[in-house]
Amino acid sequence: MLEAWNFSHSTFVFRGFPALQEHRRLLALPFTASYLSVLLGNSLLLYVICSVESLHSPMYLLICMLCVIDILVVTAIIPNMLLGLLFDWDEISLAGCLTQMFFTHFLSSLESTLLLVMALDRYVAICHPLRYTEIVDSSLFMKLLLFTLLRSGSIMGTLVGLADSLRFCSSNLIQHCYCDHMALVSLACDSTEKNTAAGLAVIICFVGVDIPLIFFSYMKILSAVLRTTAPDEDRWKAFHTCGTHLIIMMCFYLVGSVTFLSHNLNIPIPTDVNTFMGLMYILFPATVNPIIYGVRTKEIRNGFFRIFKLRVQTAMTVKVAPAGKRQM
């Protein structure tokens, strides 16, 4: 009896999309396409910003950081998930599960803070343009970076540490495609009150703090645009841009909050739906961010066309030069 009481699973098996087990290999197709689009879109945006000197400003540096985070957070879960869908490699050790959990939630929380910083950066640039270079400097960036890493690292480290202290003596089937916090904690045979409280604290800390500040920043931006004498077309562009950013952010926070709270508040969500929402919480922002912050940004668009024209001209020069020599 004592041996059974001390027993705890050291390996776990993912069981995401249980109703679609017969078609699991077909599920790999859309997720592979999504993963490749995330890698291509974010890598291209990174390349353009790093290659064009005129884009080496604070706002575009933040976009670069967003691209890196999106690539890392998707890479933390999708390749492993695809191996499970295609080759039935569904097992993961407890240490591997906790590591994946930490990096997934850590990177997602970094993205939340980064979206807040980007909103505040735009607020200063539009509402206090004459003081922008004075306020936004390298010192401020280093302080924000340190604050972001400390906030996300300490909170997510505590979350994972609490999960590591639990015993898992009943089922070892994780009803998800990756090591989501509450999906693992729900398998524990110990009291999970501390874990539930920690999960709620994460929502309050990031959603309860970041969303109001982001919303306040964009409202101030729109108010400033309305007070200007800019043409109606420019005002419409500002409304459209701010509205798009807010919609994407709200989707990110809403889906993330629902998936995080579904176990905490015993919300009856089917496993397949909860798994899909958990994946969309990671994939959707990473897929659309290069479009929202890249394709729809005039300066980045112009930078891309400039690089493309330069590459075409270089290729044409290389091809024509040998022909010219042979004629001589």
Image: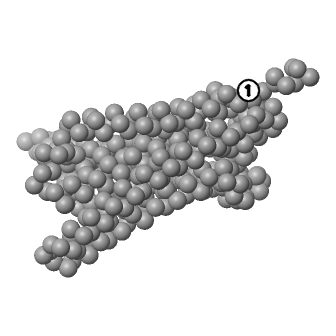
| In the depicted structure, whether residue 82 falls above or below residue 304 | above
Quadrant including the N terminus: top right
Q: Nearer the viewer, residue 204 or 107?
A: 204
| In the depicted structure, whether residue 17 falls above or below residue 231 | above
The residue sitting at the left extreme is: 328
Q: Is residue 239 left or right of residue 208?
A: left
Residue 120's spot in the image, x, y percent? 28, 53
Q: Nearer the viewer, residue 92 or 116?
A: 116
Residue 108's spot in the image, x, y percent? 48, 45
Where residue 231 sits, quadrant-wise, is bottom left
| In the depicted structure, whether residue 113 falls above or below residue 10 | below
Residue located at (49% from left, 61% from top): 251
Quadrant including the C terminus: top left
On the question of residue 89 being in view, the answer is: yes
Residue located at (72% from left, 46% from top): 175
On the question of residue 304 being in view, the answer is: no
In terms of secondary structure, where does tag 1 sit?
A: loop
Residue located at (63% from left, 56% from top): 276
Q: Which residue corresponds to mark 1?
A: 10
**Which residue type does callout 1 highlight?**
Ser
Residue located at (77% from left, 56% from top): 19
